Image (cartoon, helix red, strand yellow):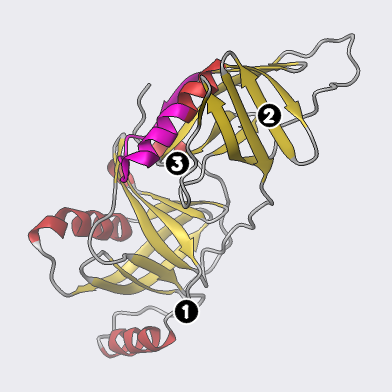
Amino acid sequence: MLITLLAACAEPTDPAGDPTGVVWELQSGTLDDGPVPIVEGHPITLSLTEDGTGGTSACNRYSGEYVISGDRIGFSDLIHTEMGCIPVEIMDSERIFLEGLTRVDRFSMGEGDLRLRGEGVELVFVALPPVPDARLTATVWVLDGLVQGDSVSSVSGDRATLELFSDGSLLGSTGCRSLSGNYVVTGTAVSVSGLEAEGSCPSDLTDQDALVVTVLSDGFTVEIQGKTLTLTSTGGMGLLYLAADLPLSPLLKVSAMVQRTVSERTTWPPKQMSLGRTWSPRASRWRR
């Protein structure tokens, strides 16, 4: 996506301020004299970067293009993922916000806030403090989405997690089976060996289980931004994770290590390297 910044050469400063490079969260808004619903736990956010605009829209993620000139701003080519959320108020919040965003034609900034206005619409945002990038290791990652080609689907079953330890071992689950294995990092690529799955899955979770196991087994690239982890494998398959504020599993880790050592399926020492950190929303399923 491209951003067009229309800067007037005769204007040395922009009296409206610079809203780019900040994550904004919607605090209030109106559309055609009615409120934009704000649903607790389902934030609406907005980011303006050199790559375009995007954020969360209560239920889905969205992105698009924008143009700025002085205090004028316009949004176009908005696209978003196709997941559904309940209760219906969440989808109403998303629909009204996205409709309002397409009407915006000017902006103003105060101390820590951003106001977008247009015909029949006003959206008031506050700046969010930057979220430090979560570490790939020493983090409990919770599965949040299943990517297949251009589509992304929600997760079912028990909470599915992934834990990568600094010694090169990993633990996880698919939502119905537990996982253990080893991994090696090379740049942003991760290869997994000795992956073992224990347990059984009901019929409605077999596809999810198979996708998780396939992505991990085939190897994947890693992208991290804030608390979001994206694993991208071959054939357009991938997994979306969110960092959880949970302790790691030391007892389970020791048990898994002993089991793999007895079965002589572990190669030591594992190799460790740091990872790059970017976020690509294109793994999701978009619609105009």
**Any mark on residue 58, and which?**
3
Q: Earlier in the sequence, mark 2 or mark 1?
A: 2
* Mark nearer the N terminus (1 vs 3): 3
Residue at figure coordinates x 31%, y 65% from the top left: 160
Picture layout, residue 66 above or below residue 86: above
* In the image: residue 74, left or right of residue 138: right
Looking at the rendered structure, the kind of residue marked 3 is Ala
Determine contact: label 2, label 1, CB under 8 Å: no
According to the picture, the residue beneath numbered tag 1 turns out to be 269
The span picked out in magenta is 76-96
**Residue tagged 2:** 115
Q: Nearer the viewer, mark 1 or mark 3?
A: 3
On the image, the x and y values in percent for residue 8 come to 82, 10
Mark 1 lies on a secondary structure that is loop
Is residue 38 visible in the rendered image? The answer is yes
Residue 281 picture location, percent across and down: 46, 38
Q: Nearer the viewer, residue 78 or 214?
A: 78
